[in-house]
Image (cartoon, grey):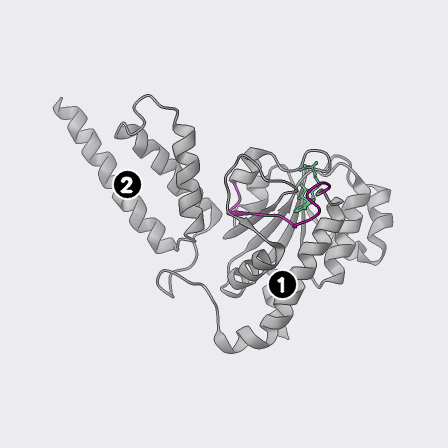
Amino acid sequence: MNHDVSTADRIRIVLVGTQHPGNIGSAARAIKTMGLDRLVLVAPQRYPHNEADMMAAGADDVLASAVCVDTLAEAVADCRLVLGCTARSRRVQLEELSPRVAAARACDMALAGGEVAVVFGRERTGLENEELQLCHAAVHIPANPDYSSLNLAAAVQVLSYELRMVLLAAGTAQAADGPAHEGGHPSDRPASHAQMEGLFAQLAQTLDDIDFHKGRAPASAMRKLRRLFLRSELGEREVRLLRGILADAQRMARLAAERQ
Ligand code: SAH
């Protein structure tokens, strides 16, 4: 089952701004029971803390190796798939996946060699819209619509369980089929988060250069374009091709401006 273990190693659970240290311990326990062990803490409010140690029970090794960083962007910089778990639908129009479909996508990406992050928000306020913007898709556990917010560690448990189910199945099914990165050329590695952000920055600049917005606020168009490109799961070569096109458009815009 080596294959299985290395696939699980490419999946990290990210907790953003956790308020109660006990939840960090419970989350560590939840992921360890499901065969995962990579925990990343983004600016936890109180950590390290004895309540975290207490709730982790036998999962203190997961806590001990947890990585602390300041921002979500840092936590996912090398990730090729970032999934943000939300208790309710937001204004940020991201594709919304069920835990099962999300787990299948995460497993596909990990099998293809890409790093994956599954991100959870603060107990009181969840993930901020800016944080969700960094995600390729949102994951919603279809809970009671009148009472849909699970305890943080309980939500981590649900997602970790779904990941385990897919990883167990992949131990047999995927080994024969090989990596499952769809779309693009098979040798085109999925673009990283940082590469996608580079594309978006150049796209935003190009839209300015060609006066696409004509006085309208750029944010709405960029949101839609981000959604479009993130959904497409672009490969590195595809990103290079698009950036080449943008560079040419920028050059033409400069030439046109010089002629005026
Ligand atoms: N009041 C907050 C709830 C936060 S619960 C809000 O409305 O967003 C803490 C975290 O647990 C959430 O940020 C989310 O990552 C996860 N979570 C809780 N319930 C969930 C659900 N039904 N589906 C997906 N994630 C959930």
Asked if one can make out residue 51 in the rendered structure from this viewpoint, the answer is yes
Q: Dot 2 corresponds to which residue?
A: 246
Q: Classify residue 243 by image quadrant.
A: top left
Q: Dot 1 corresponds to which residue?
A: 8
- Does 175 sit above or below residue 74? below
Q: Nearer the viewer, residue 61 or 230?
A: 230
The CA span between labels 1 and 2 is 37 Å
Asked if one can make out residue 79 in the rendered structure from this viewpoint, the answer is no
Q: Is residue 114 magenta?
A: no
Element at label 2:
helix
> Which residue does the image show at 32% across and 27% down from the upper left?
213
> Which residue does the image show at 57% across and 56% down from the upper left?
102
Look at the image and give the residue range highlighted in magenta: 134-147
Q: Position of residue 17 (x, y in %)?
A: 69, 37
Instruction: State how many labels appear.
Output: 2
Amino acid at pointer 1:
Ala
Amino acid at pointer 2:
Leu
Quadrant position of ligand 1: top right
- Does 221 sit above or below residue 186? above
Q: Position of residue 70 (x, y in %)?
A: 63, 37
> Which residue does the image show at 75% across and 48% down from the upper left?
153
- Does 87 sit above or below residue 11? above
Report the side of 235 relative to 176 (left or right): left
- Does 163 sit above or below residue 66? below
Q: Position of residue 134 (x, y in %)?
A: 52, 41
